[in-house]
Amino acid sequence: MKKLIMICFILIIGISNILLAEGDVYAIKKIEFQEINTWYANYIKNAVKQAEKEGASLIILELDTPGGAVSDALNIKNTLIESKVPVVTYINKNAISAGALISLSTKAIYMSDGSLIGAATPIYIKDGKIEKAGEKEVSVMRAAMRSSAEINGKNIKASEAMVDESIVLTKAVDGINLDDKTLLTISTDEAIEINIADAKANSVSEILEIRGLPKDTNIKTIEKTKYDEISKFMLSPIVLMVLLAMGIMGAYIEIRTPGFGIGGAISIIGFSLFFFAQVSLGEATWIGPLVFILGVILILVELFVIPGFGFTGIAGVVAIFASIFISFGITNIVQGSYVVLFALLLSSLLMIILARFLPKSTLMQKISLTTDTKNYSSSASYDDLLNLEGLAFTLLRPAGTIIVNGKKYDAISESEFIEKDSKLIVTKVEGNKIVVTKL
């Protein structure tokens, strides 16, 4: 009877190895000290999808990270747990903070010599100092670590101690001593001893050997491509901030100058690249761009159909800002808020600089000069127009064209929109800049 049981056990192991060997093993190569961010969450998701689609038998995620955003770590956690192909982690030096959560979310953890895992409490930077996040964020991370450890049969208490320094561990009960003032961060041997890691391995080949896979198992490597480099660059918060600032600045320039010109082009390029990065390279859907277009339409209606600035214009502005936050998604709302805030500060600074210095610059005067071929003034000095009355030849929004003494001039309304054919007066002249007020 014992021999029969032994034979059955050996057959089961053999059949399991054959089934596992049916597909290739996919190794997602590490990126040195990679921050856990939106780009990396999308990168891992695409890699797992590729392995699933091509019938992989196993995915080995090679990890070296100092941590990063909790929201992105949670996204990666969900991707790994829901994967149709078993995923194991190969910690090749560091799985700190969010990296610890990612590791615990896989079926097994293998660590190279000299590697570390732990210190997973959420933090933020305030006034240049690193501070622990509030209990709400800590509670979410602690629960995520606990649930991942439960699913994959790891040391639950030790995983929580990586997040909460108040948890005490003892050698007799937990396999390691830890006081109530220290977060748990452990080495390779310690992680194996307390059932956080499964075994020591210094290469992908060693992992295959430990798992009992055939030596001739085909290993396919997933590495960062040039496309990934571009998407990583485009999705960085600094680049997104600059693109938003471009969009806002371009819109400001367009409003302050008559006709459609360089300002409108800059605005379109800035906002288009922003949404392209979020939708095509990131996780955003088309809802954000569609809401943005709706906002632009509402503002155009306000400008050209019902001049003034009422409900339609306000709704348009709200829709535009809502579209930007929608593109970041609810899990990255904090990062989105910072990007929008700094984009507004940057664009405001540039607006002040433009308003103060650009109208007086030689370049702006050359751009602003008009060529008079049909009763259109091209004079470089308009001081003689001060306090003269005229008519609005076009809608001023606030920029447009006016007629004074039978000649046309580019002008800007001082404080409000001025309808076509309205009577007005020139209140200020600064070089080529003519400012008017409605009578």
Image (spheres, helix red, strand yellow):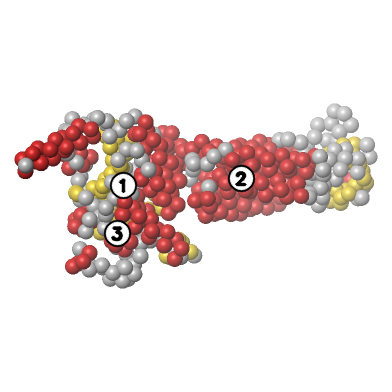
Left or right relative to 354: residue 70? left
- Looking at the image, tell me whether mark 1 or mark 3 is earlier in sequence order: 1
Going 30% across and 33% down the picture, which residue do you hit? 56
Q: Which mark is residue 323?
A: 2
- Looking at the image, tell me whether mark 2 or mark 3 is earlier in sequence order: 3
- Looking at the image, tell me whether mark 2 or mark 1 is earlier in sequence order: 1
Q: Is residue 119 above or below residue 292?
A: below
- Locate the N terminus by quadrant: top left
Q: Foreground residue, 74 or 292?
A: 74
Say which amino acid is labelled 3.
Answer: Ile
For the residues marked 2 and 1, what is the alpha-carbon distance in whole angstroms? Answer: 35 Å
Q: Which residue is mark 3?
A: 156
Q: Which residue is mark 1?
A: 106
For the residues marked 2 and 3, what is the alpha-carbon distance in whole angstroms? Answer: 40 Å
Q: Position of residue 202 (x, y in %)?
A: 20, 45
Secondary element under disc 2, as helix, strand or loop, is helix
Q: Is residue 263 above or below residue 130?
A: above
Q: Around disc 2, counting alpha carbons within 10 Å, would you say few (fewer than 14), some (14 to 19), or many (20 or more)? A: many
